Amino acid sequence: MKFRTEIEITSLGVKIGYENRVLALGSCFAAHIARKLAGAKFRVAENPSGILFNPLSIAAAIRSYADPAPVTRGELGFDGEVWHHFGFHGDFSAPTADEALQKMNAARQAGADALRTADRIVLTFGTAWVYERQGEAVANCHRRPAAEFSRRRLSVEEIVETFAELIEGPLAGKQIILTVSPVRHTGDTLAGNAVSKATLRLAAAYEKIAAEQGCLVSPVGTAFYAVHTRHPEIALYTEDCSHPSLTGSYLAALCHFASLYGDSPLDVDYAPAGVDSAEAVLLRQAAAEAVSGPSIVTDEYRL
């Protein structure tokens, strides 16, 4: 008697080998995956401009790498302590404009080099919500007053249109792997909006882009949603309720493994120290269902 559901997973033919060069862009999930790949000696570049949460900021970074014009002093802002740029993470801010420009231009050139040489692009969209300043989406608000920004949610069509242009332009000829980062908005109920409609609406965008552009989707958000719904006792996040725990990272890795290699996560016999063995079985099942099963993004959740 078998006490598990066996699922046939069709290989999508997309693999990452040591001969490939990878550029990972997006939220903290992109950083986690890139660091794991780097630890295994894969050739990978991670977020040259710093972590990017929303699709428009990721797109803007890609355009800046494709046509790496130098960052100028006129693009910087000064808060009385450091010089910053709304297209870069706070790690690139500096007490002097010259120092900030040096760091940012070095990062932009590194991004240009990584984009030019990469044949695998891992994109992780963190949220559909964007903060805009003077009509432009910002990658980082740099703790500026909320009154300086307007907040809105991107539509599926806007995300698809933006990346369709990139796929036909600077990303042409590269294998693109889209990943879904499960996002928690702690201002809402954790069991409600955190991993439900916001993530699912994003998933609809990923699926639509994938269908239209022939991209591979690693359904991390779908798996997180399933585990969160069925087994809320499993801690997929660290104490800050925003970043993945070791258990959450393991679930994401299972999804990536199954999506890239076409092998069933049910056959994986490894779990990192610190992940409960019984929970590991549930996570493998969730990853298998997310990769091979029908989408949980029903019409109820589509924009």
Image: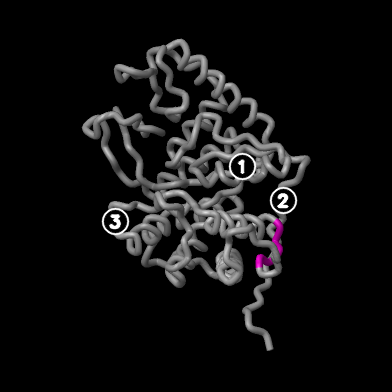
201 relative to 270 in the view: left or right = left
Q: Which residue is mark 2?
A: 15
**Residue 184 in the image, given as x and y percentages of width and height:** 38, 53
- For image coordinates 69% across by 62% down, the residue present is 270
68, 100: nearer the viewer: 100
- For image coordinates 71% across by 57% down, the residue present is 261
Q: Quadrant of the N terminus?
A: bottom right
SS at badge 3: loop
- Magenta-highlighted residues: 261-265
**Residue 289 in the image, given as x and y percentages of width and height:** 57, 69
Task: Name, please, the residue furthest toward the bottom.
Answer: 1
Q: CA distance from mark 1 to mark 2?
A: 15 Å
Please give the label number shown on residue 188: 3
Packing grade of label 2 (10 A; few <14, some 14-19, many >=20) is some
Question: What coloring was used for the rendering?
Answer: one colour
159 relative to 37 in the view: left or right = left
Tell me which amino acid carries mark 3: Asp
